[in-house]
């Protein structure tokens, strides 16, 4: 299962290759070079010799960047190795940067890294952000607002449509977990705010399903037990891609209770919305509020506020008409603004504009 940004890059490249001569340069998971074709896209995997602060050490990126001739060099951040390699290699071509998120938690390392990042961004011809908030509220990107453009991430709505097979699975999930279901899926890490959601469930008459896992799974399981919620909070673990739409459709509400700006967008919101499920999320100064519009596709609450979160969930469970309307409008918003095809088209339009200028 690909992560959010990896999944975005896969779908973007699978569409770009129909219109441009595309080569993808990435760090390998091993210390060797691999050249392959993945779904029609040329991929070069450069040897990785270590990881430092979750960053791959792949000095071969410098060599390959200097060797490849391209009209457009499109770099996805954060990726300090790629930024440094680009600055050293100075490849020809216009530079497009996809800025997916700020570095939030590694503050000391960021102080060392920031000069490299800002030098790199100063060379960019265009910087892509997923939402206006990610430009306005970023201490880094706000300095480069004049060259920043908004191209939101997307999903494939058809991947989340109800089918007869899924209907059978949804029925089984409903029979198992009851008629009132809240769903969360995402890595069990600090900024997701899962503990806030669990505490809120003390005041919500519904069953919470928590998908995926992570370093905080044990701690969250203990919290559930201490609060006496084991009968109404179920950890369902990692969910296969084919089964994920069934969990969305078996839910009445999807909740993204994130508490820090590390949550820059929240693609899972789009997946829930594409399934016609309203979202309750938090008012972070990021793309989270750009995706889920309060009162249009769902409800938003202050981050970390247990009482407000419980209140929003109860409001949706207490108003079937509102829940249905928000779910319908959520799917319509995805189809209108947040698909892989729209993302790729806007990216191609940006490329063409740069090459004309």
Image (tube, rainbow, N blue to C red):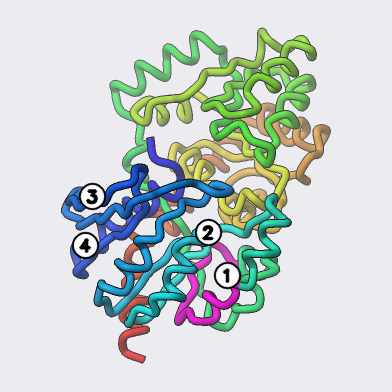
Residue that badge 1 annotates: 117
What residue appears at the point 33 percent right and 39 percent down from the top-left corner?
Answer: 159
For the residues labelled 1 and 3, the Cα–Cα distance comes to 28 Å
Q: Is residue 174 above or below residue 66?
A: above
What residue appears at the point 29 percent right and 60 percent down from the top-left corner?
Answer: 24
Q: In which quarter of the image is residue 183?
A: top right
Q: In the rendered structure, which disc, 2 or 4, sits on the residue that comes first in sequence? A: 4
Q: In the rendered structure, which disc, 4 or 3, sits on the residue that comes first in sequence? A: 4
Residue that badge 4 annotates: 17
Name the mark nearer the viewer: 2 or 4: 2
Q: For the residue carrying disc 2, how many other residues have a C-alpha within 10 Å: few (<14), some (14-19), or many (20+)?
A: some
Circles 1 and 2 in contact, beta carbons < 8 Å: yes
For the residues labelled 4 and 3, the Cα–Cα distance comes to 20 Å
Q: In the rendered structure, which disc, 4 or 1, sits on the residue that comes first in sequence? A: 4
Residue that badge 3 annotates: 34
For the residues labelled 4 and 1, the Cα–Cα distance comes to 28 Å
Circles 1 and 3 in contact, beta carbons < 8 Å: no
Residue that badge 2 annotates: 78
Label 3's element? strand
Label 1's element? helix
In the drawing, does residue 272 fall left or right of residue 40? right
What residue appears at the point 63 percent right and 35 percent down from the top-left corner?
Answer: 189
Q: Quadrant of residue 324?
A: top right
């Amino acid at each position: 299962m690909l992560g959010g940004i990896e999944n975005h890059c896969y779908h973007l490249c699978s569409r770009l290759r129909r219109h441009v001569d595309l080569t993808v340069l990435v760090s390998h998971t091993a210390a060797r070079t691999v050249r392959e074709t993945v779904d029609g896209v040329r991929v070069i995997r450069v040897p990785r010799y270590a990881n430092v602060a979750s960053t791959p050490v792949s000095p071969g990126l410098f060599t390959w960047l200097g060797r490849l001739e391209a009209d457009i060099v499109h770099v996805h951040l954060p990726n300090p190795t790629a930024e440094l390699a680009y600055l050293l290699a100075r490849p020809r071509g216009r530079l497009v940067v996809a800025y997916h998120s700020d570095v939030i938690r590694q503050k000391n390392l960021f102080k060392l890294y920031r000069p490299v990042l800002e030098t790199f961004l100063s060379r960019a011809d265009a910087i892509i952000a997923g939402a206006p908030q990610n430009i306005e509220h970023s201490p880094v990107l706000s300095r480069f607002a004049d060259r920043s453009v908004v191209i939101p991430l997307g999903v494939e709505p058809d991947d989340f449509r109800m089918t007869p097979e899924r209907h059978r699975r949804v029925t089984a999930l409903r029979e198992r977990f009851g008629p009132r279901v809240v769903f969360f899926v995402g890595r069990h890490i600090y900024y997701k705010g899962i503990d806030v959601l669990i505490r809120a469930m003390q005041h919500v008459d519904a069953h919470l399903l928590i998908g995926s896992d992570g370093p905080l799974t044990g701690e969250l399981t203990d919290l559930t037990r201490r609060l006496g919620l084991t009968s109404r909070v179920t950890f369902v673990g990692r969910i296969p891609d084919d089964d994920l739409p069934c969990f969305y459709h078996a839910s009445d509400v999807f909740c993204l209770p994130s508490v820090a700006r590390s949550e820059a967008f929240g693609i899972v919101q789009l997946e829930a919305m594409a399934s016609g499920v309203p979202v309750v999320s938090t008012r972070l100064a990021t793309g989270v509020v750009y995706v889920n519009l309060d009162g249009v596709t769902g409800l938003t609450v202050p981050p970390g506020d247990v009482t407000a979160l419980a209140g929003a969930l109860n409001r949706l469970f207490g108003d079937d008409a509102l829940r249905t309307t928000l779910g319908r409008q959520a799917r319509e918003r995805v189809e209108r603004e947040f698909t892989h095809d729209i993302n790729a088209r806007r990216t191609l339009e940006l490329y063409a504009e740069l090459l004309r200028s």
